[in-house]
Image: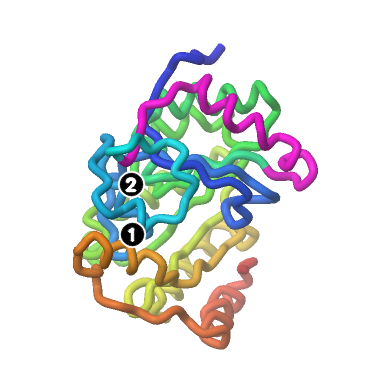
Amino acid sequence: MFNPNSSGIVYDIKRFAIHDGPGIRTTVFFKGCPLNCWWCQNPESRSPEPEPKGQLRTAYQGDLLYRDDGLIGKEVTVEQLLKEVEKDVLFFDESGGGVTVSGGEPLLQIDFLHDLLQGFKAMEIHTTVDTTGYAGYDRIQRILPLVDLWLYDLKLMDDSLHRKYTGVSNRVIIKNFLQMYEEKAPLLIRVPLIPDITDTDENLVAIAHFLSSVDKNLPVELLQYNQFAESKYERLGLPVPGGHKQPQSTDEIEQKKDIFRQYQLKVR
């Protein structure tokens, strides 16, 4: 039985999300992330604690449901979130959707995440967890039975480049992925296409080769670069990490997809 009074730090809720798993979804954003990606879309998610918002409110377009007047992030209970999400159940039922927990890195708040997922399962809501995979495997294993789908990021196969651009090694991420696969966790692999960093042919070939050696039936999703985060950094008075970049064209995306098709992988 879950603890409805269990609490954690959440910084936003996004309703009617259509890119965070199947159907229409409500995405709950946890604060705190162990990575420091150059292309981070949510710089307000990095700190695990509520923090002064400064100019972020004007830079961010989310619902702002869990932001106090002077802070980004708010401590909320499982019970509060369940009541909030319950408002969207009709949309889930009609579209085959559900709830996605994202961040930040949700696994950092494992006790809160565990109780929250138990609450969603008790309500018969489809659950998805969006993760970097950078955590002790005991945290992942604890919630495996409660997660209907994992959105699992693979960014860079070269460990030295992974350290350079994210601040951490990819060894734990790859090890966890392989263990999750062995335990038959439902996985959707997501590859963010960051110009000249992760979208190089060399990196994508390495990812495709790795995945095909595990299982050619693993689904892969390529995420086109999004410039939205650049405006956040600018409004905060911060330099854009790695400088301004242009999203890939439709033709370029097709070329990237062809790399995975050549390895007989299902890619979208």
Q: Quadrant of residue 251?
A: bottom right
Q: Is 116 left, or right, of 42 in this rendering?
A: right
Tell me the residue at 52%/28% (across/down).
Answer: 81
Tell me the residue at 28%/36% (across/down).
Answer: 50
Camera-side residue of 78 and 136: 78
Q: Is 255 left, or right, of 225 in this rendering?
A: right
In which quadrant will I find the C terminus? bottom right
Q: Which residue type does callout 2 highlight? A: Ser
The magenta stretch is 72-97
Camera-side residue of 13 and 126: 13
Q: Is 250 left, or right, of 138 in this rendering?
A: right
Tell me the residue at 44%/46% (across/down).
Answer: 131
Q: Which residue is mark 2?
A: 45
| Residue 55 percent location from the top left of the image | 27, 54
**Do the residues bearing badges 1 and 2 touch, measured as CB atoms within 8 Å?**
yes
Can you name the residue that lies furthest to the right here? 94
Please report whichever mark, 1 or 2, sits nearer to the chain's N-terminal start. Answer: 1
Q: Which residue is mark 1?
A: 40
